[in-house]
Image (cartoon, grey):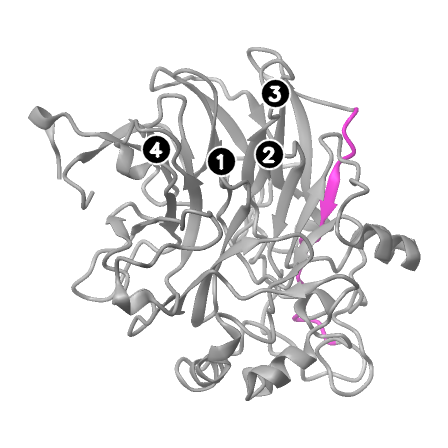
């Protein structure tokens, strides 16, 4: 920790393999997810219990697997637990990319009976796109194929909001359709599809790059921003659009609700240029793939993505050379649903820093100076020579809770940290609060007010607490 008033200890480590999420079901009582094994394990008083409380058959290739957990907001009075995971198509754990159904990502609800998680048949399972067969040609575009099948950009976070609704974030999954602001898909000549399954319209097989909002039983709230538009459209596409809260997102691992302002904040990973921190509003269009970062920086976005790293934006069907040269042209190309509004990120990094798990701190357990702050982890365990990877960032919000407070660093007045290269920390010095945590897909505040940081690379859940002056650590 870079603040000597804070210390790091290990909450649990031995016995965990690829921990990816944590939820506290009581004081000193937590459930921890393992990405690759598909197991949910219980930790009581810091001791890992020998028997998993749930074991799912997952496909853990790339960014798939057992991904996220959320408790019902009235837990334990309502003893239900929500799990986001990628189902294996073989009936056993697998890491083979092709061993997954087209709609292999899913959210299910389980009942906590005190010892195990039991499937709840009353819940309408949420099924999401998983398979990425963009290595297969589509009619008229035999040369527009990726080299291999992929399993990345699933996103994965799930959270309950202060409105009691379940929010589910799905990354772009490599899609290049209407939810990626390509009204006619990625191709300039027929056939105008997204992939071998069709598109570009966002039916269930092509919905990606979105935050969805559900009732706690898996049904769709009638006050969702595109509910009326979806109802008018009808069919599978219309019903799918009715679930959407925001779209135009790339991929991310951090999603948290501000306990004071009530807004949803979302981290978003870039390819090479402009990692983002977004305050998500209903009906938001985040701009991807037409832009990343502030729209005013579109020229830098295009320059970095076309010249710096030999990028293909991870999908050869839409090369970065097609990025617009001006903000107005990029804005005119976006796919705008009725009632949608484009929103710039609240904060950006010029080059990718790999933002990851996110949480707000509430209360003074870490010290009153941290009350209301937003903490963000890193999706990279490494950094350029001379720096340390696995960074933790701490950001303060403005008094109205609508923006990042950058008043303490004049360099950040434009709400962009102009770092010098990928994963390089220039202009983030006042935001950094810790280093060396590895890849941290989840951060949660525990019942004790301390922060619990899940490191999938270290196989550890770290605890950040106020330091005892006599026992201060680095």
Q: Which residue is mark 3?
A: 74
Please tell me which of labels 2 and 3 falls first in the chain.
3
Q: Farthest residue to the top: give it.
A: 114
Instruction: Decide whether the magenta segment is chiefly helix, strand or loop.
Output: loop
Distance between the alpha carbons at the discs numbered 4 and 3 = 21 Å
Q: Secondary structure at mark 2?
A: loop
Asked if the residues shown at circle 2 and circle 3 are in contact, with their CB atoms under 8 angstroms apart, the answer is no
Please tell me which of labels 1 and 4 falls first in the chain.
1
Q: Which region shows up in magenta?
A: 122-137
Q: Left or right: where does residue 138 sit relative to residue 94? A: right
Assign the N terminus to one quadrant of the image: top left
Q: Which residue is mark 2?
A: 162
- Residue density around tag 4, few if under 14, some if 14–19, many if 20 or more, within 10 Å: many
Q: Secondary structure at mark 4?
A: strand
Please tell me which of labels 4 and 2 falls first in the chain.
2
Q: Secondary structure at mark 3?
A: loop
Q: What numbered label is drawn on residue 259?
A: 1
91 within the magenta span: no
Please tell me which of labels 4 and 3 falls first in the chain.
3
Query: Along the line of sight, which residue is nearer the eye, 395 or 445?
Result: 395
Q: Is residue 442 visible?
A: no
Query: Along the line of sight, which residue is nearer the eye, 220 or 202?
Result: 220
Q: Left or right: where does residue 413 sit relative to residue 86? A: left
Distance between the alpha carbons at the discs numbered 1 and 2 = 8 Å
Q: Is residue 36 visible?
A: yes
Q: Left or right: where does residue 428 sit relative to residue 323? A: left
Q: Which residue is mark 4?
A: 451
Residue 427's place in the image compared with 214, above or below, is below
Asked if the residues shown at circle 1 and circle 2 are in contact, with their CB atoms under 8 angstroms apart, the answer is yes
Distance between the alpha carbons at the discs numbered 4 and 2 = 20 Å
């Amino acid at each position: 920790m870079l603040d000597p008033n804070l210390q790091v200890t290990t909450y649990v480590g031995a016995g965990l393999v690829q921990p990816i999420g944590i939820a506290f079901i009581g004081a000193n009582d937590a459930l921890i997810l393992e990405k690759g094994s598909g197991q949910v394990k219980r930790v009581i008083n810091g001791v890992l219990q020998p028997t998993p409380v749930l074991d799912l058959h997952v496909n853990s290739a790339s960014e798939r697997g057992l991904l996220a957990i959320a408790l019902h907001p009235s837990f334990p009075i309502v003893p239900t637990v929500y799990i986001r995971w990628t189902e294996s198509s073989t009936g056993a754990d697998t890491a083979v990319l092709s061993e997954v159904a087209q709609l292999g990502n899913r959210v299910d609800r389980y009942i906590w009976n005190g010892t195990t998680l039991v499937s709840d048949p009353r819940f309408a399972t949420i099924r999401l796109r998983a398979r990425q067969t963009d290595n297969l040609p589509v009619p008229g575009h035999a040369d527009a194929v990726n080299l291999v099948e992929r399993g990345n950009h699933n996103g994965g976070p799930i959270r309950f909001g202060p409105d009691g609704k379940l929010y589910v974030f799905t990354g772009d999954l490599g899609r290049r359709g209407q939810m990626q602001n390509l009204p006619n898909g990625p191709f300039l000549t027929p056939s105008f599809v997204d992939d071998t399954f069709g598109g570009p319209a966002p039916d269930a097989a092509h919905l990606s790059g979105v935050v969805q909002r559900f009732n706690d039983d898996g049904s769709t709230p009638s006050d969702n921003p595109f509910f009326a538009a979806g109802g008018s459209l009808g069919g599978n596409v219309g019903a799918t659009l009715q679930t959407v809260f925001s779209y135009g997102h790339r991929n991310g691992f951090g999603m948290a609700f501000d306990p004071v302002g009530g807004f949803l904040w979302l981290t978003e990973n870039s390819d090479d240029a402009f990692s983002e921190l977004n305050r998500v509003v209903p009906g938001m269009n985040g701009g991807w793939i037409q832009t990343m970062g502030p729209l005013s920086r579109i020229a830098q976005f295009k320059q970095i993505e076309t010249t710096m790293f030999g990028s293909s934006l991870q999908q050869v069907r839409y090369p970065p050379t097609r990025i617009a040269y001006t903000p107005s042209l990029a804005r005119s190309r976006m796919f705008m649903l009725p009632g949608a509004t484009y929103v710039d990120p609240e904060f950006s990094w010029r080059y990718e820093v790999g933002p990851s798990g996110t949480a707000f701190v509430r209360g003074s357990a870490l010290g009153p100076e941290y009350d209301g702050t937003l903490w963000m982890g890193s999706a990279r365990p490494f950094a350029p020579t001379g720096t340390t990877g696995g960074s933790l960032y701490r950001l303060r919000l403005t008094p109205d809770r609508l923006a990042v407070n950058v008043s303490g660093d004049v360099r950040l007045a434009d709400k962009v940290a102009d770092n010098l290269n990928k994963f390089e920390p220039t202009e983030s010095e006042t935001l950094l609060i810790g280093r060396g945590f590895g890849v941290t897909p989840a951060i949660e505040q525990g019942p004790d007010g301390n922060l619990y940081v899940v490191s999938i690379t270290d196989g550890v859940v770290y605890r950040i607490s106020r330091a005892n002056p006599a026992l201060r650590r680095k």
